[in-house]
Amino acid sequence: MKTTINGQSFEFEPQPEETAIAIIREKAQLTGTKLACGAGVCGACTILVDGKPMTACLLPAHSLEGKKIKTVEAHPANDLHPVQRAFMAHDGLQCGFCTPGFINESIAFYEQWRREHGKTEPSKAQVAYAMSGHLCRCGAYTGIYKAIQRACAGDFDETAQIVSPRVEAIEKVTGQAKYTVDIQYESMLEGKLLGSRYANAKILSIDMEAALAMPGVEAVIDVLEDKHRVVRFVGQPILAIAAIDEQTLHEAIQKINIQYDIRPFVTNMAEALQPGAPQVYPESKKVPPNASEGPIPPGKWEGNLRTPFINHFLSKRKGKAQAIYSKAANDPALHLVERTYKTSGQTHTALEPHAAVACWEGNEKLIVHVSTQVIAPLARAIAKHFKLKKEQVEVFSEFVGGAFGAKQGLTIEIKSAIALSRHAQKPVRLAYDRMEEMVLGGYRPFTQTELALAVDKSGQPKALVAKIYGNSGVAVQSQVAPWLRFTYTGMPKALEDFDVVTNAPGARPFRAPSGPAAFWALESAIDEMAHKIGMDPIALRRKWDNNEIRPPLYDWAEKIPAWANRGPVNTSNERFKKGIGLAIGNWFNIYHNATKIELTASHKGLVAKTAAQDMGNGLRSVIAKAIAEEFGISPLEVKVEIGQSGYVEGPGSTGSRATNSVYPTAIEAAQKVKRQLISAIGVKNGRWEGAGIRHEGGYLPLALVLQQAPSIRVTTKRGSNGWFDIMGKMPSGELGASLILKMTGAVYIAEVVVDTLLGNIKVTKVWAGLGVGKITNPVLAKSQVYGGVIQGMGYALYEERQIDPTTGTLLSFGLEDYRIPGIGDTPEIDVHFYEGGFEQVKGEACGLSELSKLPVAAAIGNAVFHATGWRPTEIPMRPHLVLEGVGDGE
């Protein structure tokens, strides 16, 4: 078969079952084309075939015969298409994994649009229709809209240098960014996990001899991490296999014979709590996985119900809260809101799956490429697990294709790739397919919150009582109650958190772990109380709220015309009803006090290094901008090297800690280098002015300073903020996690239109107000908020994790079955930052990624109530729930 790819002739002999993406990625070595869903749903693999966009994951390889193919690499850095330049300028990307597909589709749209319409700007609806086959889990749609519109309008026809807020944008829009799934070594084997067919069973025997005897199979190892030899969910890894290619892997799996003792199982919370329900952990010593980012505290087990010891510390004046609640229903001096709120599991669905590439150099050196959020702690964990010295392990993670909390710690795919590589003495790549990613990759726990809120006639809070049940599958630690404890802190509270285990895959932390579920319940109840007692929702919150960051945000919200003029509840008799709702959120200001930045100044320029990773949050750009502003230069003139564990200690990208860890550290490093450069060049009365040194003899620009001065290297450490910090250690091994005892705050307003005939909810606009201290990079900060809003909207309206109760099999196992927001779902998002209140924090900056998601679902639910008079208590608010609720006339 002959074909032309990016103007170069290729000749292949594809197998009958091979797809175009296999030819392009593995044989033509053009890894800009990404495999994500494997079902033609996400668009990440889109290529241009004779100018027409097609999904390479579904396209048979033989259909490329005689065609002219263009991948994203067709337009390199020195010959960018206007669309690529527009994506860079308008930050139409975050992690970048989906970007090549968007670029190719956008180029096809641009070319057709310009032929038919010239330099006019397409509408958002026209762009959305053209991009409807593409998904971005980071939620970069706002920038994508603007990029495509302005490219079509001609803003980027000229080849002038593009100023991008993201320093690595050029690599991402040209397909040069290398993710873990793109790494290739000579003689590299492919790895795969073999998971359980049953939801609860004991492994009696495993016969792998026939598989091991197959040509091309080089290793089969046992990876079941259960000393009782019990599998507790469908898909739980039992074996890991390494072979020369995917086809051989699949054939080998068919030859492995596993004998099971099949046992009863339970897949949902209600059944798990029934007397006599099958126990997920019948053993006396139970060792469940951890669904949280903190350590698992001791707990008491009763069947499948676990009561954490920490419950003793969650309440505040518990007895008083319970006494007030017990009499509230019959006390005319009190108002009571009492509801049960439910949330579904929300699957992470990062487009780059969990993946690891392991390569041993003998038994003395181990190199691991991995898609991770915690590169430095992971290197230490690998060394400890495999009994190596830390200098024997190098971990690389230059680009991460989305994570959102699920890619932390030494997970099974990493351990398996390393063990397979050691056994086979060859490099091994193990990457989940989309089904494995949906099963094993992580999800936000299911929750059920039984909440009661009592206030007096004046609206003063008197009691909050809540029992929260979290279902994290085989894992524990859903941890919803702490968010109720640390919000509206003045009132008496009786709070209890419970874990309910089931025979389902274990949950993982997901952007603002447990927070969205907590604020869904709490802010829905407060909105209901405000309407019940006839008080303005903001006025009621002001009465309760002692978060000093939030009053300026309330002031801002009250001035929004749509809020001020919202009118009463459910006034329209039309099919489409518009409503507006408000909710708040809090997040701890967490940072990593052990973070270091190494900054070198030499004739080669400025180079900053730290052992951190960037999963789309813009860490490179934050470091570059901080240093560049000190030196009065462009961030593009600062080279930032991250993604290697051998660099100085860096932060994990968890808990919204990365930016506020590196930002002040980078500034301090730049300041030290500036002082040393003045000293090194020996001028009199030298001082920095603009992008150079002013001295008695004149002015030296930075370029000349670097040519004259010797090489200077400094390393700075973030350090703590003093007495008001709490120190800690993350389970992944990250040292020096610190918590500032002052929370950030958010106020969100959502506007919705409810279709009362079909039950659909459309979010038309979101106003997002956040108090997170200094905004270090405004464009990227807004991009993070956009992503948080879009992911929160998915949680509220679409995303539903479903398991077959008869088999324990995950039903929503692909992106065609599990609905995440697309570009057409994107509302208008107006972001407002309040930058005061954190002057005592180094750099004055706080994290915002988690906070940006917390209030979204509750604001949407409260807007639905305002539109219809129906109070939603369960998310996602799927159409059948809307129709039932609106039909009830509640």
Image (spheres, rainbow, N blue to C red):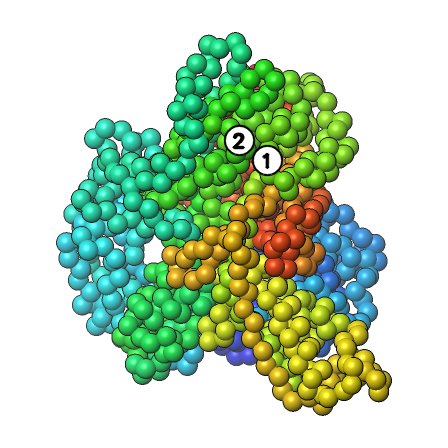
- x 40%, y 69%: residue: 379
- x 72%, y 88%: residue: 681
- How crowded is the residue under tag 1: few (<14 C-alpha within 10 Å), some, or many (20+)? some
- Report which quarter residue 254 is drawn in: bottom left
- Report which quarter residue 697 is drawn in: bottom right
Q: Which residue is mark 2?
A: 490
CA distance for labels 2 and 1: 8 Å
Q: Is residue 794 above or below residue 753?
A: below
SS for dot 2: loop
List the single residue furthest toward the left: 204
* Residue nearest the observer in this picture, 135 or 414: 414
* Residue nearest the observer in this picture, 100 or 224: 224
Q: Which residue is mark 1?
A: 546
Residue 598: x and y in percent read: 56, 75
Q: Amino acid at mark 2?
A: Gly
- x 41%, y 57%: residue: 729
SS for dot 1: loop
Q: Amino acid at mark 1?
A: Asn
Mark 1 or mark 2, which is nearer the start of the sequence?
2
